Structures are given as structure tokens and as C-alpha cells.
Amino acid sequence: MLGGAGMPSTLKSVPIEAGRLGSALCVLVAPKKDLDGAQKVDRDGAETWLVSVAVVPPDGRAALIEVSVPGEPKGLTPGMPVGFVELSAFHWEIDGRSGISFRADRVVPALAPAPAAPAAAVKSAAGGGK
């Protein structure tokens, strides 16, 4: 349903368990702009940024999503694994168009898992490699 002037009457935000998305890689970080080219701000007055993220779920069907965040994300570079703080999705419908938008409190560099040590190094460290 639409409210007045083509605006949605309600937006229901649905929390997303980010770990279920699978792998997430930063593609691009850019200011979120309005139709006039000015940077958008959220209801708290913070400038809004878009982080384009390639997600590859366990089924292997990759997708590109754009996640809105308040404030400029720091330390993100293209190709970097990322994680999300308080990721949510919401369905929108305006003037006969609809879609799903994503929002997060932050998008942050993900900690890469430590590489597995070779078996010989583990054996040596344990005192068994003499």
C-alpha cells in the first residue's frame, strides 16, 4: 500500500543473519545520492553511503547487493572480505515500482581465517619433530 505522494505507508525492516549470506566481498564504496545529485542524509542527519557487496551463499549463486550505511565506511577496499553490523532488509514500493533494500549500522573489514599450519610445523612446535 502507498501513502500520500507516492510514499510507502509502512516499511517493515527484517533483520538478516549476515553469516547466512555466505562470503561477502566489497565491490565499491560511494556516497548515496538523491535525484539532484546531492548526498543523502539519514533521519539522524548522518551522510549516507552505499557499499556494493558481492555475496556468494553456500549454494554458489552469487548476487550483488547495495547496503546503505550512515557515515563513510573506513578501511574498505574492492575485493576485501567484509562483515555487517546489524544488517536488515526492507521491502519498498513506490509509484508501481518495488524492491528490497539493505541497510546496516556498519560494513566492516572481515577477519580472514588464519591459514592452516603445515602438519610438519605443528609436529615440530609440539616437540615431536626431532
Image: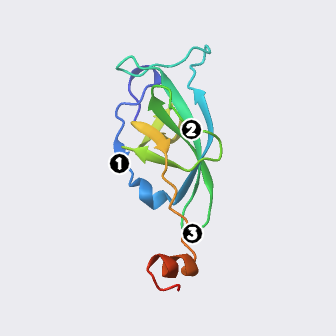
Q: Sort mark 3 into few (<14), some (14-19) or many (20+) by Cα contacts within 10 Å.
A: few
Q: Is residue 74 left or right of residue 10?
A: right
Q: Amino acid at mark 3?
A: Asp
* Element at label 1: strand
Image position, residue 65 (x, y; %): 57, 45
C-alpha span from label 3 to label 2? 26 Å
* Earlier residue among tags 3 and 2: 3
- Residue at (55% x, 65% y) in the render: 115
Q: Circle 3 is placed at which residue position?
A: 59
Q: Please name whichever residue, 87 or 74, is drawn nearer the observer in this view of the structure.
A: 74
Q: Circle 2 is placed at which residue position?
A: 76
- Residue at (65% x, 42% y) in the render: 78
Q: Circle 1 is placed at which residue position?
A: 15
C-alpha span from label 2 to label 1? 23 Å
- Residue at (52% x, 56% y) in the render: 112
Q: Residue furthest front?
A: 130
Residues at discs 3 and 2 in contact (Cβ within 8 Å):
no
* Element at label 2: loop
Image position, residue 38 (x, y; %): 57, 14
